[in-house]
Amino acid sequence: MSDATGQPINRPTRPAWLEVDLGQLAENFRLIRADAPAGLAIGSVVKDAAYGHGAVEVARVALCQGATCLLVSNLDEAAELRDAGITAPVLLMGERMESELPACLELGLSLAIGNAPAAEGASRLAAALGQALPVHVKIDTGMSRYGARWDAALGLVEKIVALPGLRLDGLFSHFSMSDEMDKSFAHQQISRFRAACSAVERAGLEAGCRHLCNSGGFLDLPQAHLDMVRLGLLPLGVYPSSVCRRIDGIHPVGTLKTRLAAVRDIHRGDNVGYGLHYQAPGERRIGVLPLGYGDGYPRVRNAGHVLVRGKRAPIIGANAMDSTMVDVTGIPEAVAWDEVVLMGQQGECEITAHDLAAWKGTVSYEVLTAWRSRLPRVYLNGGAVH
C-alpha cells in the first residue's frame, strides 16, 4: 500500500494472517533432495500461489535448493514469476487458446501440448517469429482430462517433431491415485506411460525429460521417478494422504493465526451466530475471532477447534464471513488479543490441513488453496510481510 507520493504506508497488518516459514521450506527441500536418487530432477509446482503460500517466495527457495524448473497452470501465474525477475524454466500446464500463445513466447515458457490442433497453432506462431518453442507432450494414461491417449501418443509426438518452430523437450502424464494403499491403477498408468515412451524411442525420437510423479508418486512409487518429479504439496510439509511414506524432519511451513478480538460471557439459552446453530447449555465464556469463510477458512457449524494458550477451544455455531466463535470456558486464562492458531502448532497441540479438510468434508489441497488474498502472508526467515 502506498500514499499519494508513492511512498509505502507503514500500516499494521490485520490480526489474522498466514505465517510461512521459508527456513522450514528450505529444510524440507533439502530432506527431499537427500531422499531422492542421484540425478533425479525436481520440478517445483507453484500454481495457485504455491498452494496458497506465495508463488514467488516458494519458487525462490525451491530454485536455491536445486529445483530445475517451475510449473504453473495459467499465464498470470507465469507472468508473476517473470515479473519478479525469475528466469528459471517455467512449464505451463493444461491447454492454451491460440490467443495465449504470443504471451507464452514473450515470457519464454515451455508449453504442455496434448492435441494436434494446439501443436499446429503453436507451430505457426513460433515459426513465423523464428523461435523454437519448447514442448512437453501430455499423455493421457487414465485421467481422461488432457493429453493424447497412451496408445495413440506416438502420432502426436511425430507430428510435433515434424512441425517447424517446436522443440520436443519432454513427455509426461499424471497419476489419478498415487497416495493410497491400493496402487493397482497407478501401476497400470506406469505401464501405459512406459509403453508410450518406448514407442517414441523405437521410432528413433528423443523423448527428452520424462515425468509422471507427483508428491504421492515420489514417496511411494520409486519405479516411476524417471527423469523428474513434480512436487507441490510435499515441500510445504503436507503429505498427500495419511498412508503414504514419511520423510523424517519434514514439517508444515504454513501456520494460520489470528487473535481473540473479544472474550465475553453468555448464559444458558443464549444463541451464538447465524442460523441459531448453537444454544448455550449453561454459563459459557466465548471468544470471537476476526476471521471467517471470507478468508478461506472452512464454513463449519459446531465442528472443529482452534488453539488458545496451547489448549483446544471448540468452534461453536456457524462461522461467518468475517468471524468465528469458540468456547474458551475451559481456558479461563484466555484474554482479548491472545494469539490463536487455526492451522499449525501451539504448545503440544497441532491442527493440520487434513484436520480442517475433515471438518469441511474436503481434501487438504482445497483447504490450502482457499486462503484468500485479503489474508496477509508473513514470511519468516528471510521473507517479508505482504
Image (cartoon, grey):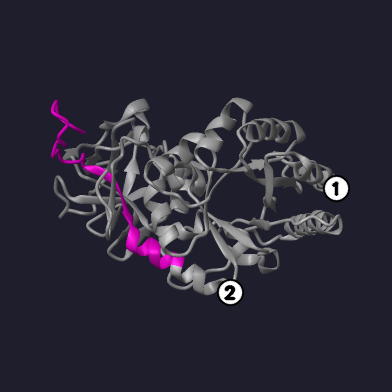
Q: Which mark is residue 250?
A: none
**Which residue occupies 62% across, 39% down?**
94
Q: Which mark is residue 38?
A: 2
Chain part drawn in magenta? 1-29
What x and y, as percent, mark residue 30?
Answer: 44, 69
Residue 114 visible in image: yes
Residue reaching furthest to the front: 130
Identity, as a three-letter code, of the amino acid under mark 1: Asp
What x and y, as percent, mark residue 187?
Answer: 76, 60
Asked which quadrant contains residue 39, the reply is: bottom right
Instruction: Give the Cα distance between marks 1 and 2.
Output: 31 Å
Secondary element under disc 2, as helix, strand or loop, is loop
Q: Is residue 218 left or right of residue 186?
A: left
Of residues 207 and 72, the one drawn nearer to the viewer in this rendering:
207
Residue 74 visible in image: no
Quadrant location of the C terminus? top left
Question: Which residue, given by chain and number where applicable, does mark 1 sit on?
Answer: 151
